[in-house]
Amino acid sequence: MPKAVKPANFRTRATIRDEPIEYAPSWTTIPFDSYEGMTQQQFQDATFPYAKHGKLVPITVPKGWRRVESTHPGTHFYVHMETGAISKVPQEIYNSKKNSWITRDGNKVGAAELEMDPLDRALQLVQGVKPLPAAIEAPEVSKTLSTKEAAPTPTPEVKKEEAPPPAPMPELEPPLPVGLLFPGQGSQYVKMLKEVKDLPAVKEMIEVANEILGYDLLQLCLKGPESKLEQTKFTQPAMFVGGLAAVEKLKKDKPERVERCQAVAGLSLGEYTALCVAGVFDFKTGLKIVKLRGEAMQEAAEASEQSMLSVAGLDEATVTKLCQEAKESEDDVCQIANFLFPKGYSCAGSAAAIQKLSKTAQKTEGCLQARVLKTSGGFHTSLMRPAREALTTYLNEVVKEMKPPRCNVYMNLTGKPITPATKPEEIVPMLADQLMNCVQWEPAVREMIKDGVSEFYECGPMKQLKAMMKRIDPNAFKFTSSVEI
């Protein structure tokens, strides 16, 4: 009897077979060589506690690095103190000062390691695995091989001479408790730069300055005339170069005081010299900024009759009150422009108001001095608004060429430091606002002393900052030196 034929259906027409399907083993059960025999699931389970909020991850900061919290709470980055490099984690970096690659711990990377295969080098860094040999030895031929199947005579192995290990790089030394101070406008004098003009670095700076400024800066500093040197547009470039020339002189005698200084600060214009020494901008960029700043400030000063007055012996409240009384109209400007030392100020504003302030201050009990300054404008007041606008525009153009400082810079606007974690975009408004706001010099110096700076060098002409230091902190004055130019 013939077999019954099953009726056709969609499965038979589509040739669908009802057979069991075999699946590949799950990835969670496959051992993974790089995980030391663990399966991938076991590896994830083992590392999960360290991934959760990072609570169990040990934090180690290699010598020479600083761990800094970012603007987002809980997130951090690392700053290399010597080079200023910023990274999410400490890693190998290129040190342009020493012209070599250095490890995260500050040791020089040897030539042999630089020539390694990238994969071998990565394994060496991450797991401490030694680099793979250039050639793998052939396995020994079994003695039981028949004569017909005898292996050819092995080529004798040629041992490569290993390169001697590189000399260990000295560990990066911490900053010294040294502060470099830079004077501002008013410290200039004819014959400045006489003692440093023959230094090679100073000669090079003057050649570059002459090209940027369009006149012979050295001749102006050495021979004057004084009336020209006192003009703001000439004074500021001269003082900028003078401060850097003093740094070159100090670097020649005590290089570690410059290379390992803990902090820098400058009075008014001197702040730009300090930022240049801290690596925020190079010499050319800094001089161009100072040139524009001096020209803009002189133009703003010539827009109306303005003046500045040095007052000593009176407290802040008394001087502020006298400034208000010196104003004869709402358009008059008269205010404290610089906090220099205890009961020592510079006041600036309209010429008539400053003259009146001079007379009333001299008659006030306790006043030791009320002297009109050489400066030609009402600096650090609202009279500098046009200069601030011009300076802001130019700073925004060159901000891409600026870098975070290599050390702390104590700013005039706040009297507080900016650190290597400060972005250039944050520095620009502080420099612009400085033109219209009081310079916090005394608070800045006190903050430096509070932060551990115990040795100071005034880099630039005259000794005005050293004289102020005597009144700010007599003990710090004993360890303050002037680098004359």
Image: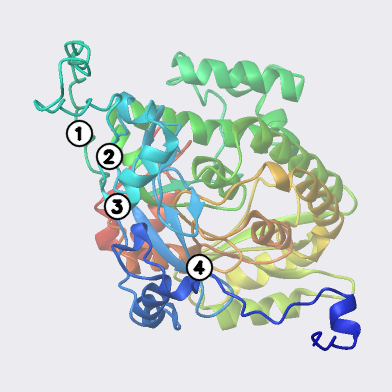
Crowding at dot 1, Cα within 10 Å, few <14 / some 14-19 / many 20+, comes out as few
Q: Residue lying furthest left in this view?
A: 143
What residue type is disc 3 on? Gln
Separation of disc 3 and disc 2 at Cα? Answer: 18 Å
- Residue 255: image quadrant is top left
What residue type is disc 1 on? Pro
* Marks 3 & 2, CB-CB < 8 Å contact: no
The earlier-in-sequence mark between 4 and 2 is 2
The earlier-in-sequence mark between 3 and 4 is 3
Q: Which residue is mark 4?
A: 416
For the N terminus, the image quarter is: bottom right
Q: Which residue is mark 3?
A: 127
Separation of disc 2 and disc 1 at Cα? Answer: 6 Å
Q: Is residue 394 left or right of residue 197?
A: right
Determine the residue positioned at 40% across, 64% down.
67
The earlier-in-sequence mark between 3 and 2 is 2
* Marks 4 & 2, CB-CB < 8 Å contact: no
Viewer-side label of 1, 3: 3
SS class, disc 3: helix
Q: Which residue is mark 1?
A: 168
Q: Is residue 196 left or right of residue 301?
A: left
